[in-house]
Each structure stands twice: as structure tokens, then as C-alpha cells.
Amino acid sequence: MGQASASFGDGIHGEPKSGKKKAKKSDRLDAHGDDRREEDKLANVPYPRGLPTDRPLDVDDYFDQLHVWLDLEADAERARLARLRQIRSQRDVESTGQAIVGLDLVDYHTGLAGRYLLDLAKPGGRELPMNRLKVGSPVVLSNDADLSDEGIAGVVSHRKNHVIQIATEVFPDPDAQTASGKKASKRADASIGELRYRLDLSPDETTRKRQIAAMAKARGERGRGGRLRDVLLGIESPRFDGTKIDVAALPDETIDEERRDIDFRTELNPPQRDAVAFALLADDFAIIHGPPGTGKTTTLAEIIAQAVDRGERVLACAASNTAVDNLLERLQRLVPYVVRVGHPARVFEHLRDYTLDGQVERDPSSHVIKDLRRELEQLLRLAQRESRGESRGRKQRGEMFAEAGRIRGQIRSLEKSVVRGVLDRADVICTTATIDEELLSDERFDLVVVDEACQSTEAGMWQAILRADRLIIAGDHCQLPPTVLSDEAAAIGMRDSLMQRLVERFGEPVYRRLTVQYRMNEAIMRFSSDHFYEGSLIADASVKSHLLSDLPGVDDTPLTNTPLMWIDTAGAGYEEQLEPDGQSKLNPGEATIIVDLVKQLVDAGIKGPDIAIIAPYAAQVRLLRQRLDLEGLEVDTVDGFQGREKEVVLLTMVRSNPEGVIGFLADRRRSNVAMTRAKRKLIMVGDSATLCVHDFYADVLEYFEANEAYRSVFEFGV
Ligand SMILES: Nc1ncnc2c1ncn2[C@@H]1O[C@H](COP(=O)(O)OP(=O)(O)OP(=O)(O)O)[C@@H](O)[C@H]1O
């Protein structure tokens, strides 16, 4: 392997470890006024500089620390929601991307477990504003006309340009909605009921509660579970193949052939094969470090298939739905019986057959459930009609809602037994790391695998860990960390991953790095490899020198026959701007260059679906989406592209100011993700005078210059 374990902790975090100081009391008061609660939380932090890696962690101190992080995060989320609810103008509130107002309830259905699925749309079928309410986001649905309405909780289950669907446990009964006394006006349009609604992105209380419950359980674990916890806290040494590892020992270069004895199911390269053999030998945990495009998910799928071949049951998790689906995509060919737990709308369409809902639907007894659902829907529609006509009043309507509740109960208990049957038969269950404990109930596994593990907080890992005897985690700490809203929590370590901590604690013996990548032209890969992975990456021969001009139907032009280009806007006066009414930044000058470049690419024969534009700021994304109308072209933030790839990627860096302020671009991991999405061509547009105040971007620029890929905007002639 040869890589130094110190490289895992060499300041890839937002701030270097040594820079993490406990905020001084006076600083905290500055930041939080006289909020005593906030100050108390920080006063009791067991590990104010983040979790230490040079010694064993105390069980209670460790879980106390995780609690503090979760509390700070919950406060930050609640404060965000409160601020959002104070914004009065529709344009302002929607420009935050965190709320949609003035919505009508246009339709509803019932889903698995008796959930209500509510379709919401703008009056007249207008397009919804750009928003961050993604499938799976927790939301609050409330009366738009009544700011005091606390609303009902739900989860986004489906979204299109004009309609957003949410799943709720409660039906928005119009009487309940107007309980605050304010009467909503009636409207003669397509909406069901009388109210106009608003949807707000909400603090994810359910996830937090599940994490807290898992932490409480882990704290008290004994036996096998207690041992795994103690290993993960650095109290006990991990064992491989029955042998305790010696932290000071040199790593095994490869697992020798006799110990390997694996009949590989997929074509893997040597580092991948070694990683599979290594992971299968782990008695407690093993780590797979997968830099961009190195086949981390492919390797994990092989590990899971091998475990199933040995008669084991596996829980396959990841931080996001997309990552779970990527894993499932590879598993479907390797494992006979896989079940994907999660709302079908959050699952890739071509994988829906694997969902629990899909499999329950195909179960012979499901026709009884279908009949009951139909009955429930009819009853709800009748109750709604009653509420409109107000002919027989509230009593009648109340009885109907009560009957609906009884039918829901019946549906639930029938579904429960079918669900149990489907889950019990599964060799592998795939789910996000936020596990639905009620659904999985007491299902146990021999092995739990967590992909994209660096995108989970430590608190977010325990639900998965508790379900099995052995743990395999895969990820890349040099890519994006988990989203943490609270600056306080981030400053005391909440963004640092379990994976990184374990590598720092135990060193090379506990992980394997994959080094052959199948995505990028070597020139695109090299900078990232040298900066983040000690130059260890190798471009596979199939991609090493591939260019846009090698694609069928693409002309050979200076734009298509080279892998790199930086267009420097220094001196052009393309200053960044703050979005009117918003917080986000944009750069119209850079947008003009990007639009021109896309036109040139299309003229050379590149198709829309092969092009991605990545901007660090949502306002620039919005501007470019408005200015470009090309089928299949994707414009998104860095976060939206993690784990994905495109033939050509155009990066607009946005920041351009005399002070050299670059905000969150200072986190190099963000740029690492952005720059490693491109397969054949990477184009960066940015102001070197602003960016290169920072060493990292000075190095990027130098690299482009050395590769004869530097152009000034003046020479480019836009
Ligand atoms: N041994 C291999 N031989 C050929 N192609 C491979 C091999 N391993 C992986 N690939 C290909 O490389 C690509 C990336 O694989 P995969 O999605 O598993 O990587 P990853 O490390 O999970 O990616 P990332 O984390 O960057 O999203 C896929 O197209 C996959 O088919």
C-alpha cells in the first residue's frame, strides 16, 4: 500500500485539527447573545476539540459528545425554520429554496403503512419555484394564511416541475387547520378543501430521535455488540482472521493467495481483489478507501455477494438514497434475493421492483389490502365533500374520519405480516443509514456495510452498527463531508467521520485504498491524485487518454482534443454579485462565458446529457438554468454531483472580489469533488486574482499552466 496513515488527517477537514479551539466564552456570547442554553451545552462538551484519536474514548463521554452535537444541530435547524417563517413576501421566502407557499391540495392517495400521499400544486398549474425540498426531505405542511399554525409533519415522496407530493401520517383535516380561529377564504378552483398551504423544509426530528435511541442502546450494549462498540471507540483492538492487530505493525502488502481462496463474481483489479479479501477477513470492522471512480461500490457489491455465498445475511446502507440505489444496481446481478427498504419514489425507477412496497404489492394477499385502500380513499373523498357542502356538519365528518382510522389500522396489520415475510426471506436488505426501526423490527444481520460513510455523522452510523456483528465501511474523506448546519457543532467535530477517526486511531492495518480509476483522463486525475491521494491513483488504460474528440460524431477542435482548460477572468471586471433578496452569490460575467462554451461544445457535436455545469452557489445555478435551454444538460451545485460523472464538466467558480474572499470554496474537498466528475474534459472558469490568494487554487492554476491549459478571458475573446 505504501500510503502514510497520517495523510488521512492532514487537514482535509474544514479546519486543521490543531486549529479546533473551544470557543472562548466571550466569542460564544457574541455569536449567541444571552442564550444561556447554548452556552451550557458547550460548557459540557467532553471533547471540545473533536474526538481525539490518540487514545481510547470513554463510552459515556463519547455518547455525551454525540448528544451535544445533535442538540446544537437541532437548535440550528429550529432557528433556521423560525427565521424562514418570519419572511413575509412570497418571493423572498421562496428564493431561499426552503419553502413553497400558496399551494393547493389537488389530489391524494394512500400508500404503504396507511400513509397519506398528498399532491400539492400552485394554482393554475404554474411551475413550482426552484427548491431544496428533495424526495426524502422532512417537511411541515401548514396553513399559508396562518403563521401560528404549527402544521403537520411529512416527507417529500415525489416531485415534478408542477406538483410536489408529500407522505403524511395525518390527513390535513380543514377543521384542524383552522383551529387557530382564522377562517381561510373559499376559492373556486381545482383545489380540494378550502385552504391554501405552505410547505417548509423542517428539522428532521424523526431522524434525530432514531439516532438518539440507537446511541442509548449502544451505550448499554454487552456481549458481541459491546465488543464492536469498544473496538470502534478504540478501547479494544480490532481482530482480523482471529488475530488481534498490532497498531504499530506494518500493513500486509496484500492478503496472500492461500488465505484468499475466493471465487470472484466480478472482474476486479488487484487492489479491489485485495480489498475484498481483506474485508472478508475482518472480525470486527474493515475500511475501504475509494477515491473518485475507483470502483468502491463495485468492490462493496462483491464483498456482499461473497458474504451471501457464505450463508450470511447482510444489511447494505449508505448515507443517501442515491448511494443506496447505486449499490443495489450492482447487487441485483449478484445476489438472488435483495429488498430495498425506503419509499419507492425515492428509489431509481428501474429498481422499483426491488422495493419493499413493490414486493409486498406482488404478494398474493395484497389484493385484500388493495380493496381496503380503495375503501379508505372513497371514504376520505366523501368526508371532504361533506366538509365542502357542510350539509350534515362536523359530527358526520368526524365519524367518517374515525372509520377511516379503523380501516387504516386494518391495512397496517395485514401489511405488517406480508412485510415480515418479505424481509425474513431477504439475503440482503438495502436502506439508508436512517433505518426505519419499526419496519426492520428485530431483524439481525451477520454483516453491515455502509457506503459513502464519510457523508454520515458519527451519530448517524449507530443505527446501522447495532444491527450486525461486523462492519465494513467505505468512503472517501477527501470528498464532501456530511451537511451540518450548526457552525458550533462543526467546530467541535460533528463533520468528522467515524471512518476517518478509525484510520487515524488504528492506521494502515485497518484499511485498503483502491487506486485504479475508470473515469478520468489521466491529466484530469493527476492533480487530485497528487493533492489528495499522495499520487497513488492510476488511470486505467481504457480511460487514460480518452478525449471528447474520440466520441463518435464529435469534431476535432481545440476545445475537444485537450483534457483541461482554465479560463482566467482576472482583470475582466466580472465581479461576483449577491442575489437580490437572497443570500446566495452569482457571477453573470462567468455565466456568459459558460453559455458561450456550451454553444461551442454543442456545435462540435457534444450532446446535452454529456455536459454538466457545476457552480458552488445556488444563485449561479439558477442563473445558468435560466440562460441555457438544452435538453439533457445538467446544472447543479457540487453537492448535487457527488458520486456522479459526465463526459465534460464546466466549473464556474463565481467568487471574484478585491479582498480574495472565497467563502466555502476554501474547503478543498468541495473542489476535489467538482474537478473529479469530468471524464474527458474539465473546464474551469474563475478569477485567479481572487482564488489564488489561497495556496490550493494557486497550485491548481500552476497545474493548468504546466499542462498548457491556461487561457486568459481576453485571449479567449468572449
Ligand atoms: N475492475 C473494474 N474493471 C472495469 N471497470 C470497473 C472496475 N471497477 C469499477 N469499474 C467501473 O468504474 C466506474 C466507477 O465504479 P463505482 O461506481 O463502483 O466507483 P465508486 O468508487 O463507487 O465511484 P464514486 O465514489 O466516485 O462515485 C463504473 O463505471 C464501474 O463499472
Image (cartoon, rainbow, N blue to C red):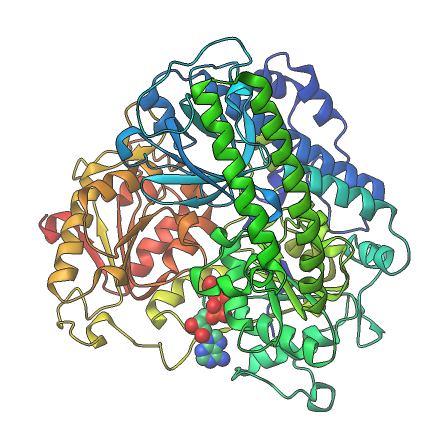
- 138 above or below 287? above
Instruction: Return the x and y of residue 437 as percentages of the image width and height.
Output: 71, 49
Residue 369 located left or right of residue 697: right
- Quarter-wise, where is residue 705 in the image? bottom left
Residue 414 located left or right of residue 299: right
Q: Nearer the viewer, residue 535 or 265?
A: 265
Q: Residue furthest bottom?
A: 258
Answer whether residue 10 is visible to the viewer in this image. no
- Quarter-wise, where is residue 519 in the image? bottom left
- 479 above or below 273? above
Q: Residue furthest left?
A: 717
Residue 248 located left or right of residue 449: right
- 562 above or below 502? below
Instruction: Return the x and y of residue 694 as percentages of the image width and height.
Output: 39, 44
The number of numbered badges drawn on the structure is: 0
- Quarter-wise, where is residue 51 in the image? top right
- 240 above or below 64? below
Instruction: Return the x and y of residue 276 as percentages of the image width and height.
Output: 64, 77
Instruction: Return the x and y of residue 282 as percentages of the image width and height.
Output: 75, 71
Q: Residue furthest front?
A: 392
Answer whether residue 360 is visible to the viewer in this image. yes
